Amino acid sequence: MRVAAIDCGTNAVRLLIADVSGDKLTDVARRMEIVRLGEGVDRTGMLAPAAIERTRHALLGYAAEIAELGVTAVRMCATSASRDASNAQDFRDMVRGVLGVDPEVITGEEEAQLSYLGAVQGLSAEGPYLVYDLGGGSTEFVTGTRAISVNIGCVRMTERHLHSDPPTPAELAAAEADIVAAVDTALAAVGGRQARTLVGLAGTVTTVAALAHNLEVYDSARIHHSRVEASDVTRVTQELLGMTVAERRALPVMHPGRADVIGAGALIMQIIQERSGQSAVIASEHDILDGIAFGLTTD
């Protein structure tokens, strides 16, 4: 069965076209566009018309590829920004017009379970697992059947706290206090400190992994299921927070649309590492997209 899964978050909209047979998923195409759908949502409570238009443009390209590759089922899940926005109906109407399907505005707990399903497929590390999905507006934590979503993400924390370039010590202290409180709440809710293996998902995690491994070019095969030591997470985070946006953008593995928010994302990643007591994190390229795709075969 050839399916298309689309994940629309606060920062990026991503597409996976895959052939699914039983519990085996074979990639046909993976795409990612930085659209910053959640720009300003934390402050205004609304999706900006320009952000909706950027997302529409990306989805038009995805729709063409879906048609060209003979997809038989499409599912789009929208996450943090579309949950928070007062004008989310405008976004839903746009998606229906472009894709011909309604976006599912899923809860944080549903997002976490889909991320967990995608992340643990083919993972050889010893469980139980604590999986976190570090997004633009929220971060999801899940351990098997227990899940929680908290409103810390790379875009939200940047817009809320990190206004200087590079951020000042006072800004970093305010962000850290916000993040620590949310992470401690999440870990207590899901029993995260009892996990044997920490697994991190999404663009912040894979970018930090690429930097920790000193890659000259972004290489998904080398990043997927690679182990990043806690000391390297801290080192890369502090390096990123000390850089200007222009300096981050010049890094060879950095997506240009991520450069302005990667500092806040890395700080969230570092604090999760510290507060969970884990010595390392496993970076996974498989995440909510894979969970959405698997779910299409059981609907």
Image (spheres, helix red, strand yellow):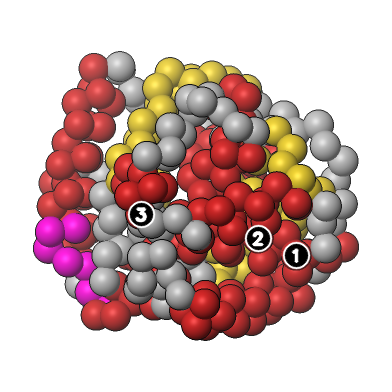
Q: Which corner quadrant of the image does residue 245 belong to? A: bottom left
For marks 3 and 1, the one nearer the N-term is 3
- Residue 201, how many percent across, how many down? 58, 47
Q: CA distance from mark 2 to mark 1?
A: 6 Å
- Residue 115, how many percent across, how many down? 58, 48
The residue located at (76%, 45%) in the rendering is: 229
Q: Is residue 161 magenta?
A: no
Q: Confirm or deny contact between disc 2 and disc 1 (CB under 8 A).
A: yes
- Residue 260, how many percent across, how many down? 36, 56
User: Which amino acid, mark 1?
Assistant: Glu
Residue wearing tag 2: 270
* Label 1: few (<14), some (14–19) or many (≥20) C-alpha neighbours in 10 Å: some
Q: Secondary structure at mark 2?
A: helix
User: Which amino acid, mark 2?
Assistant: Gln
Q: CA distance from mark 3 to mark 1?
A: 25 Å
Q: Secondary structure at mark 3?
A: helix
Is residue 146 shown above or below 204? below
Relative depth, front residue between 44 and 178: 178
Could you tell whether 55 is left or right of 231 in the image? left
Residue wearing tag 1: 274
The residue located at (52%, 77%) in the rendering is: 169
* Label 3: few (<14), some (14–19) or many (≥20) C-alpha neighbours in 10 Å: many
Residue wearing tag 3: 245
Could you tell whether 187 is left or right of 241 in the image? right
Is residue 233 shown above or below 15? below
Magenta span of residues: 45-51
Q: Is residue 103 visible?
A: no
